[in-house]
Image (cartoon, rainbow, N blue to C red):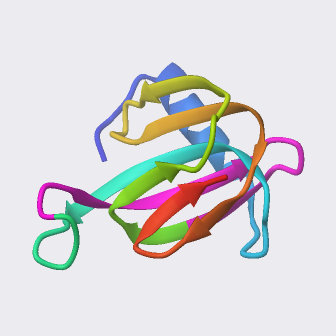
């Protein structure tokens, strides 16, 4: 991992305050962490990613591994999309959401 300025590292370290909860159903923040090329077991033009689902109210997170697509089921109230210094992509919503999983993840 590269050396970041302390102001940047502090923002990255903040995520460690969330407690892991594999039963978490609702979230309002997603972090997508790219892993490796999905070829030949996924979409050939995609990367597999690990998805971290964060619930800001409960300060909990759930981790879903090795998916290659994120779908939005209906109108979703996205507030922010940003690429972070560590290469992850954040998607923050204005309200809580749920997801269903297979090879693709559908946000409901």
Compared across the picture, whether 58 is left or right of 90 comes to right
Q: Is residue 107 left or right of residue 25?
A: left
88 versus 39 height, above or below: above
Please give the range of residues in magenta.
44-63
Q: In the figure, 85 relative to 74: above or below? A: above
Q: Quadrant of residue 26?
A: bottom right
Which residue lies at the image location 38% right of the left edge and 29% below the top edge?
4
Q: Magenta includes 43? A: no
The location of residue 16, given as percent across then percent down, is 65, 51
Residue in the image at 63% along x and 32% along y: 92
* Secondary structure, magenta segment, majority class: strand
Answer with the quarter of the image where residue 5 lies. top left
Q: Is residue 40 above or below residue 93?
A: below
The furthest residue to the right:
58
Q: In the depicted view, which residue is nearer to us: 77 or 81? A: 77
Q: Quick check: 100 above or below 98?
A: below
**x, y (%) of residue 31?**
52, 46
Near-viewer residue (66 or 95): 95
Horizontal side of 37 relative to 51 (left or right) equals left
Residue at 59%, 41% in the rendered image: 13
């Amino acid at each position: 991992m590269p050396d970041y300025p302390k102001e940047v590292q502090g923002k990255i370290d903040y995520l460690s305050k969330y407690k892991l909860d594999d039963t978490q159903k609702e979230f309002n923040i997603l972090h997508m962490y790219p892993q490796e090329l999905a070829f030949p077991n996924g979409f050939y033009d995609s990367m597999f990613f690990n998805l971290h689902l964060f619930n800001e109210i409960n300060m909990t997170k759930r981790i879903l591994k090795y998916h290659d697509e994120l779908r939005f089921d209906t109108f979703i109230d996205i507030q922010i999309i940003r690429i972070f210094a560590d290469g992850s992509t954040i998607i923050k919503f204005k309200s809580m959401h749920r997801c269903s999983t297979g090879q693709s993840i559908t946000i409901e």
